[in-house]
Image (spheres, rainbow, N blue to C red):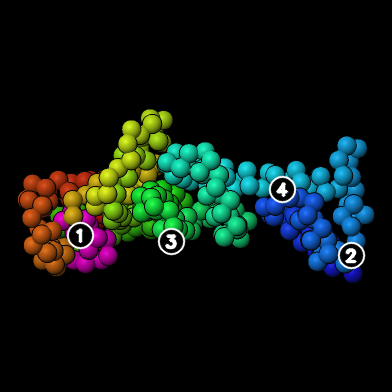
Amino acid sequence: MADLALRRLQRFVQSVVVHPGETRAAAARAARRELRGATPDATLRPSRTLSAVERIGIYQGMYLLRMRDALAADYPGLAHALGENGFWDLVRSYVARHPPRSYTLNRLGDHVPDYLAHSHRPDRRFLADLARLEFAVTAIFDAIPPALAPARLAPPGPGTIFRPATPLALLSLGHPVGPYVDAVREGRAPRLLPRPRPAHMLLFRRGFAVRRLDLSPGAFALVSALAAGHPLAPALDGLSARARSDLSPRALAALFRTLVGERILVPA
């Protein structure tokens, strides 16, 4: 019985803390549901200056602040684009739709890109692209590096299969949001919002930093095929004529110097 009473009390406190509305009204509703008619003031002790409900209200006020800090850490570019009030509005509506379900807040922002993409905002496509890039950066930073066999010394041939040597992501977006995010993270205010234009990029981790390599459409198609495990020759042969048009021999050589030299992709 004591355990049951404790669980009810815990559910009561949690219900009030995560409720976005007025504290006393939230406490009254939660008390009817969890405390079997007992009032919060009769169940929890007050302090010398605050009632029981006012004490819970302190944690209720801190709840959204903590959510805001966690989301702003993962989405600084998005927070800058929306402004302080706009970002607060996003935090309130997003957390109401996707409350935290884990012991860690690292996963709180997992649904932000899709949430924005399906919103009714006129700028939703730009904001969703911005969020997709920032989410990928966070995911790569938190990812576990792949286990690798000893490096091969022989140069790659037509049948060589490559595999990622570091956590990476390939993104194809409708806005060139990379420079915008760069400016915000470096403390420089972006001058203008980027106009819609296809942008292809490879993100990879190097040490404790996530780097971005902007790619042409042809380079993006090739790297995507190689990262998916296609052998080198079939990956090249499978490129469309349009993709091949921006992969000159010089551009191809430069791409492979970066991929292999930076150990982004290595022969399997």
Determine the secondary structure under disc 4. Answer: helix
Determine the secondary structure under disc 1. Answer: helix
Tell whether 80 sits left or right of 16: left
Residue marked by disc 1 = 221
Sequence order check, earlier mark of 4 and 2: 2
Sequence order check, earlier mark of 2 and 1: 2
Which label sits in the foreground, 2 or 1? 2
Taking the image as drawn, is residue 134 in sight?
A: yes
Residue 169: quarter of image: bottom left
Q: Are marks 3 and 2 in contact (CB under 8 Å)?
A: no
Which label sits in the foreground, 1 or 4? 4
> Label 1 is placed on what type of residue?
Ala
- Magenta stretch: includes residue 143: no
What residue range appears in magenta? 218-231
Q: Are marks 1 and 4 in contact (CB under 8 Å)?
A: no
Which label sits in the foreground, 1 or 3? 3
Taking the image as drawn, is residue 233 in sight?
A: no
Determine the secondary structure under disc 3. Answer: loop
Local packing at callout 4 (Cα closer than 10 Å; few below 14, some 14-19, many 20+) is many
Sequence order check, earlier mark of 1 and 4: 4
Tell whether 93 sits left or right of 156: right
Query: Residue furthest toward the top?
Result: 188
Sequence order check, earlier mark of 3 and 4: 4
Residue at image coords 31%, 39%? 179
Residue at image coords 76%, 50%? 23
Local packing at callout 1 (Cα closer than 10 Å; few below 14, some 14-19, many 20+) is many
Residue marked by disc 4 = 60
Looking at the picture, tell me which residue is in the foreground, 43 or 20.
20
Which label sits in the foreground, 3 or 4? 3
- Mark 4 and mark 2: Cα distance apart in space: 22 Å
Residue marked by disc 3 = 118
